[in-house]
């Protein structure tokens, strides 16, 4: 029987990063993955493939709608080759997962392909295609991730009524895509197919899209996506989804209780994700799950069984790849006797639509609810020379700072390249910078990052220079 210092069940961003860090710290490490390829949801059917399609569809939209304004004439008709677009997406995925395989080999991590389940607290059975194997591990990290949620009355047939997994490999552009759920995944994939020619209708139970983010971001993204001809039915409760041949019929009640009917040829069910522990046999190790199916952990991500930890989507908190990575690193360093920490308030959130949406720290709604005295500074992207040069003028940057100390409490932005720009906000807040600190740092001109400096100026003394 092979013996290890640590075994990780699940090879998503949390699991494979935990494995690398454990190996770097001198531990004999095993990584167990149920599928034939490494990388988990994010690399295979989540973050990476969706961004590949977002980028491809963005190029197409630019060619059709914006190149002429830039003085670029394309003779003939610009057409979508969806088959090639999906193939390119898969090539990006394959290259990325092969990169993870290389990292496992480089760091001398033993990889097992099969379903890992607890035999007891120190032994893990691995059900492989060619039989079962058992390994022994002093410590185990559960990193089994999540899977798409649905509603109890919806039958996902994976053909016309689909999840994000199927939406990444459609063989045709929908005529009318109905998206149930106005969160990150639904909006991103909805925008992909809207760019490619589909009509898109979003049905959301809450009174706004991206409800977990700052209200100003929700309002601005709604406005921009409406300009892009995406239809929204907010405050609508879906009560049935029925397929009739190639037609999908969605019935929902609006906020007054009036029933509406929406008909399309595809329906993307995007109502969140739920933790995945199927086949883990957690009870054999004595590991407790909560009422939502998540693995219960303490502040050190340790379960009720002292040598077993859990990270990522399978525990409480935001279901984000980079959050899982930080947790994987943290557990590895704890096992090595170090004293790492994670400030969950400083885990950024991003929506990869165009314009991109990004946020870190407290929202205005949270600060009001907590009774914190704050000041806000906001700067529009359209006031930037760089934004006008690239014709990406939608959006703004908003900085929230403590009214008395000027410490930055939240950074919220929507616009071009905000997925990258938010790192400046995270860095500033990690070092407890004030709005004035940011405002006094030189930002290259012309850039989108200047909006961060200008928002900080606005928050400092209402003295933005260019608005």
Image (cartoon, helix red, strand yellow):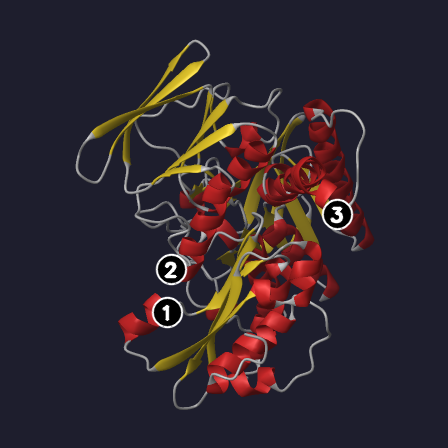
Name which residue lies at 58% across and 36% down: 192
Q: Which is in the foreground here, disc 3 or disc 2?
A: 3
Name the image quarter holding the C terminus.
bottom right
Name which residue lies at 60% across and 37% down: 45
Q: CA distance from mark 1 to mark 3?
A: 38 Å
Mark with earlier residue (2, 1): 2
Disc 2 secondary structure class: helix
Q: Residues within 10 Å of mark 1 (few under 14, many from 20)?
A: many
Name which residue lies at 44% across and 54% down: 315
Disc 1 secondary structure class: helix
Residue 89 occupies which quadrant of the picture? Answer: top right
Query: Residue 80, percent across and down?
Result: 69, 26
Residue assigned mark 1: 364
Q: Which is in the foreground here, disc 1 or disc 3?
A: 3
Q: CA distance from mark 2 to mark 1?
A: 8 Å
| Residue with the most extreme top position | 245
Query: Residue 123, percent across and down?
Result: 55, 46
Q: CA distance from mark 3 to mark 2?
A: 34 Å
Query: Residue 242, percent across and down?
Result: 34, 18
Residue assigned mark 2: 215
| Residue with the most extreme bottom position | 404
Disc 3 secondary structure class: helix
Residue assigned mark 3: 70
Labels 2 & 1 near each other (Cβ < 8 A): yes
Residue 211 in view here = yes
Query: Residue 359, percent across and down?
Result: 50, 63
Name which residue lies at 40% across and 67% down: 363
**Left or right position of 420 against 239:** right
């Amino acid at each position: 029987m092979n013996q290890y210092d640590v075994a990780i069940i699940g090879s998503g961003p949390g699991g494979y990063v935990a494995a690398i860090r454990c190996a770097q710290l001198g531990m004999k490490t095993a990584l167990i993955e149920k599928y034939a390829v490494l990388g988990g949801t994010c690399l295979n059917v989540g973050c990476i493939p969706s961004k590949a399609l977002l980028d491809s569809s963005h190029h197409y939209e630019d060619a059709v709608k914006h190149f002429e304004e830039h003085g670029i004439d394309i003779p003939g008709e610009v057409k979508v080759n969806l088959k090639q677009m999906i193939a390119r997406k898969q090539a990006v995925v394959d290259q990325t997962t092969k990169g993870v395989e290389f990292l496992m080999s480089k760091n001398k991590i033993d990889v097992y392909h099969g379903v890992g389940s607890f035999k007891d607290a120190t032994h893990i059975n691995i059900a492989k295609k060619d039989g079962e194997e058992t390994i022994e591990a002093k410590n185990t990290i559960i990193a089994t991730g999540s899977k798409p949620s649905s509603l109890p009355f919806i039958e996902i047939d994976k053909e016309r009524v689909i999840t994000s997994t199927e939406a990444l490999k459609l063989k045709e552009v929908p005529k009318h895509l109905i998206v149930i759920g106005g969160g990150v995944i639904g909006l991103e994939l909805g925008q992909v197919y809207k760019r490619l020619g589909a009509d898109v209708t979003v049905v959301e139970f809450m009174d706004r899209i991206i409800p977990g983010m700052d209200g100003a971001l929700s309002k601005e993204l709604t406005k921009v996506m409406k300009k892009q001809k995406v239809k929204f039915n907010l405050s609508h409760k879906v009560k049935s989804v029925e397929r009739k041949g190639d037609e999908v019929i969605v019935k929902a009640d609006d906020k007054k209780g009036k029933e509406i009917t929406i008909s399309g040829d595809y329906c993307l069910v995007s109502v969140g994700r739920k933790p995945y522990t199927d086949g883990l046999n957690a009870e054999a190790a004595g590991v407790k799950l909560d009422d939502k199916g998540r693995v219960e952990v303490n502040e050190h991500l340790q379960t009720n069984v002292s040598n077993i930890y859990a990270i990522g989507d399978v525990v409480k908190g935001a279901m984000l790849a980079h959050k899982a990575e930080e947790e994987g690193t943290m557990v590895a360093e704890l096992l090595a006797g170090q004293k790492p920490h994670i400030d969950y308030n400083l885990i950024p959130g991003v929506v990869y639509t165009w314009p991109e949406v990004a946020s870190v720290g407290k929202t205005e709604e949270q600060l009001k609810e907590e009774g914190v005295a704050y000041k806000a500074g906001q700067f529009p992207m359209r006031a930037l020379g760089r934004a006008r040069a690239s014709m990406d003028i939608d959006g703004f940057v908003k900085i929230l700072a403590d009214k008395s100390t000027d410490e930055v409490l939240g950074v919220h932005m929507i616009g071009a390249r905000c997925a990258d720009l938010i790192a400046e906000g995270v860095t500033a807040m990690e070092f407890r910078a004030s709005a004035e600190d940011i405002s006094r740092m030189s930002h290259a001109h012309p850039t989108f990052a200047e909006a961060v400096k200008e928002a900080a100026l606005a928050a400092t003394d209402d003295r933005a220079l260019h608005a």
